[in-house]
Image (cartoon, grey):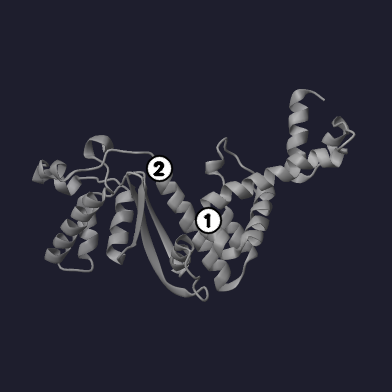
Amino acid sequence: MKLRELQRAMQAHVLHGAQEIAAEVLASQRFDIPTRLGVYGQGYAERLVEALAITYPAVQEALGRASFALLVRELAHRAPSRSFSVRHYGRELSESIAMQLTGTRGRGAAELARFEWALAHVFDARDAPRMLHAELEQLAAARWPRLVLRTVPAVQIVTLTTNAVRWWRAACAGAPRPRQWRSQRAQQWLLWRRELAVYFRPLARDEARALEALQQGRTFGLLCEQLATSATPERAAARAATLLRTWIEEGLLLSLAAAA
């Protein structure tokens, strides 16, 4: 075989168990051909188990090491990595959990995986200059209705319908697990980073809609109109001002100069 053919045959063996590469491998006095190939075929999945345990520590804690490893091994062969960096691998784990686990436990564990993936994304997101209050203070009043505000890359919104966050907190604190997975009213959570610290908090419904509007590129004027659908114009204006101040203080908004 030529080099490219050898590489493809080895990849087929590692990912799918194909045996064509066996004809190109020599046995030794200590190890037969299946054992030598097994170093790669089994090692590939085991390295991914180790890597994803770092990305999903709470999922591993909630499901148990053995069950977690089985899920990752299945994922490794069903959805192999498409990136040169292992950090970008594993987004599909929540889908694997949802397919293989049923009921509230399956939904909760899948949501816990989505939450941990979002946390990892927030931590790794690129740095960007954040908006300061002075930028808006210098802005002419006529520009406010057409103003487009953008969130920094390290902002994520995740919707959860279970007590997945309680399971995450228990795992991180080494505290006793909740007694069971529970369904609850859908709650949107905001995740963001300042410096090297990652934060998250639940969102009120109007704030969640407002942030989603910003991420869709809507103007500040349209955002205020949206808030006014459930409040008087005066209260909507006050709410918009409060949200804007909070977002700047938390470092959620991209500097106007960077967004231009």
Q: Which mark is residue 57?
A: 1
Choose between 231 and 87: the one closer to the eye.
87
Quarter containing the C terminus: top left
Judged left or right of residue 172, residue 79 is right
Which structural element holds mark 1?
helix
Amino acid found under the numbered disc labelled 1: Pro
Judged left or right of residue 45, residue 123 is left
Residue 132 x %, y %: 19, 43
Quote the CA–CA distance across marks 2 and 1: 19 Å
Judged left or right of residue 158, residue 131 is left
Choose between 145 and 49: the one closer to the eye.
49
Q: Residue at 26% x, 51% y: name it.
A: 250
Residue 1 x %, y %: 82, 25
User: How many neighbours does mark 1 have within 10 angstroms: few (below 14), some (14-19), or many (20 or more)?
Assistant: some
In this view, which residue lies farthest toward the top? 2
Q: Which mark is residue 125?
A: 2
How many tags in the picture? 2
The reply to whether residue 83 is in sight is yes
Q: Residue at 62% x, 66% y: name it.
A: 101
Choose between 66 and 112: the one closer to the eye.
66
Q: Residue at 46% x, 66% y: name it.
A: 170
Q: Which mark is residue 114?
A: none
Q: Residue at 14% x, 66% y: name it.
A: 235
